[in-house]
Image (tube, rainbow, N blue to C red):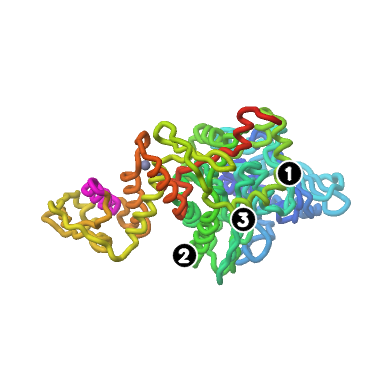
Amino acid sequence: MSVIKQMDELLANKIAAGEVVERCASVVKELVENSIDALAKEIKIILKDAGTKEIKVIDDGIGMDKDDAVMAFNRHATSKIITEDDLYNINTLGFRGEALASIASVSEVTLKTCQEKQGTLVKINGGKLLSVENSDGRIGTEVTVANLFYNTPARLKHLKSLYTELASITDYVNKIALSHPEIRFTLINNDSILLKTDGSNNLLKTIKAIYGTDVAKKMLEIEANDEDYKISGFISLPEIHRSNRNGIVTLVNSRVVRNSELNKAINDSYHSYKPDTRYPIVVINIELDPSLVDVNIHPTKMDIKFSKLEELISLISTTIKERIKNINLIPHIEEKYEINDEIISNNIIDLTPLKEEYQEQTLVFDLPKKETIKEENKEYIKEEETTFDEIKEEETEYLEKKFPELSIVGVVNGTYIVCQNEEGMYLIDQHAAKERVNYEFYLKKLGEPNLEVTPMLFPLTLEYPVNEYIVIREHFDTLTDIGFNIEEFGINSVIIKAHPTWLPKGYENDAIKHILEAIVTFENKFSIEKFNESVATMMSCKLAIKANQYVSTEELEKLILDLKNCDNPFNCPHGRPTIVFHSNYDLEKMFKRSGF
Ligand code: ZN
Ligand code: ZN
């Protein structure tokens, strides 16, 4: 090859590096996926300073012979150019070939690999081959990428804080571990272990390794299928939720993909079981015929389009809703070491003001649970080790329990009803409980076709800005269907002459304004289901008993009975808990009674 041609090649690699290698996580991704392609059973990722100093990936895969080892860094030498079909049919991860050459052009790379007895050691600096030597015979491959972007200072500046780099690597490794529970992954940064999975092909164990035992105990297994799709995986109980979406992982044929509509559908399935702005932990694998997806292959992400998306969404939401519907969802308040991952992840978010495009990739950051525990309480680790086998048993317990029989003991601060049964003490938030009861009442009313209508003695006229008026005008039918008599009234105004009888007495005018506002907020994304939910939520709060309001014991008994009869008695329509539980055991523990 002529010198000029070589220069061209180097330049091309450097340019390509700018596109393919954006940050440390892109290097980790490339190396790990090579290891997976090499059929590794174990992959170790060892970082120095979040990968900015060094990234080492060691696998026990099939390794390369000497020729392949040298060729691996040649930009056009790839044997793995892939079509979309291949992507799902063969077991390889895509966007190969150029990436390794690009990485080598902007760093110092050492490759040690061995296929049979004789190993090879290749050293490359800034894309220039320094040496090819023989090395020892450990089967597998070890790639070390040091000083990333050392020769491209402009890109070096683009690397974010160590925290951010580490967060995005952790996010990637967590997800790849979830998609390959059969591979043993170890992620180490500056000698501390951030993740270690056991490769036992047990997804729940991988979830435990990432999120800790407390979360793993509160995961529910799901499985369902229809003609086109088969879904399986784990979803968290609604009480487990986080401030960002990164706990929602969707796999297609065991590969991590991204589809925002799917993520939204998963989150929506928890509607009113948890606050809408908090997100569950969900790992769902979707098995399908490759012809049903359209993949946009880009080196840094895997966006996917489903040709029968509606069908898939409905399968997923029905499955999740059914799974959480009949479970006892009373949060169990235990007196023990709580690892507040809230604080951890919020801190991290504050620390990393990120560019929009990175947000989804980087916000997840699961600090090593074990490490955190180690400092606080060593005994707890022992407990953690033993409880894993019990996960399954406890899960079935959830299934059998329903809303408990309770007797009222009293009321604290005119707000919390104290109740008991043979298992322990329950606290019910009277406002939240009444909200839930009202919510289901109004939701039912809104869905009923034959509604009683009350003519208004003084018709109500309301004026709106023209854009809002247009939206309301478009939905006159919706309003008529639920029992309103509404007409145009001059410019940008409407007149309401009758309303459904079930509007809260004394709050009729307010309620009408709220309902029209709800229509305006939806604009062109109007759906009757969402509209009904939002109207019911609004009215439920208006009519609920306030905190600090005296309520007679008879009324409280009626309230608890009504709550018990709700479809979801465990949350108010805003997703907050209506009831919490302290077991007798916890109470005894709290007072250091026998055995503690
Ligand atoms: Zn409220
Ligand atoms: Zn509420």
Q: Earlier in the sequence, mark 1 or mark 2?
A: 1
Residue behind mark 3: 221
Q: Is residue 368 visible?
A: yes
Contact check, label 3 and label 2, Cβ < 8 Å: no
SS type, badge 1: strand
Q: CA distance from mark 1 to mark 3?
A: 29 Å
Is 444 on the left or on the right of 167, as rendered? left
Task: Tell me which segment is drawn in magenta.
Answer: 505-520
Q: Residue at x 41, y 35 (%)?
A: 415
Please name the amino acid that badge 1 sits on. Answer: Lys
Q: Is residue 465 left or right of residue 2?
A: left
Label 1: few (<14), some (14–19) or many (≥20) C-alpha neighbours in 10 Å: many
| Helix, strand or loop for the magenta stretch, by majority | helix
User: Residue at label 1?
Assistant: 44
Q: Which secondary structure, mark 3?
A: strand
Residue 486 at x, y = what percent? 18, 59
Kindly identify which residue carries mark 2. Answer: 310
- Is label 2 in a helix, a strand or a loop? helix
